[in-house]
Image: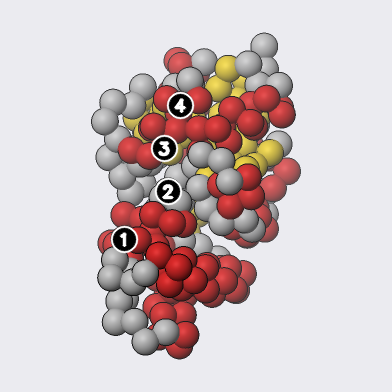
Amino acid sequence: MTKGILFDLDGTLWDSSKIVVDAWNKCIEEKTDRPERVTVEKMRSYMGKTLDVIASLLFPTAGREEQLRIIRMCFVYEDEFIKNHRPYFYENEQEILAALSKEYKLAVVSNCQKGYIELYLDHSGFPELFCDFESAGRTGLSKGENIKLVMERQGIDKCVYVGDTAGDEQAAREAGVPFIHAAYGFGTPEAPDASISSLSELAAAAEKLI
């Protein structure tokens, strides 16, 4: 049996919210005449949502095409900022993931734009620990569908999905896999199968569910 642990990214494997806030606010100020600005609290509430949903929440009075035009510009600024500023990684992340990779196939599945997971892998210094990754920006699929896609590609028979939001929990349910709540992240799901307060607790939680 091939076992896997699939991860959400923001609020689960790193916290890029402060850098993203700076990038988006700079973009909105320089490229638009919109009055909206983003806070870290607001940004964390957006984490895990798809591009179109974030655009509607941030620019509710703008037309649909304008919402999407601005949010795409924000993502361009975001990628450039993150290339030059390393987001916060959680304590002992490399050591924990290295140990897990000996028993499980590890992969990242996020609702982010194409190229964002690659930034995480570049900054991490340990991309070899992950066998695969997938994003909504690359496939146009839901997170649940992307979880199933990665499982199929990697021949994973049983796995858990680790994330911090209700959307992550819904994706795990869609994919038919147990959900582990990263309670140190940004969200509050309804009924996770397990909850961890740090990555150091993941091995024990995964062992019980797989």
Tell which circle, 3 or 2, labels the residue nearer the N-terminal end.
Answer: 2
Q: Seen in the image, is 93 located left or right of residue 192?
A: right
**N-terminal-most mark, 1 or 3:** 1
Between 63 and 17, the residue placed more toward the observer is: 63
Q: Confirm or deny contact between disc 3 and disc 2 (CB under 8 A).
A: yes
For the residue marked with disc 1, what is the amino acid? Leu
Q: Residue at x 29, y 66 (%)?
A: 60
Where disc 1 sits, the SS reads helix
Whichever of callouts 1 and 2 sits on the residue coming sooner in the sequence is 2
User: How many numbered marks are there?
Assistant: 4
Locate residue 113: give its quadrant: bottom right
Residue of label 3: 168
Q: Find disc 1 in the rendering and name its residue.
A: 57
Mark 4 against mark 3, which lies toward the viewer?
A: 4
Secondary structure type for disc 2: loop
Q: Is residue 98 left or right of residue 188?
A: right
Disc 2 designates what residue? 48
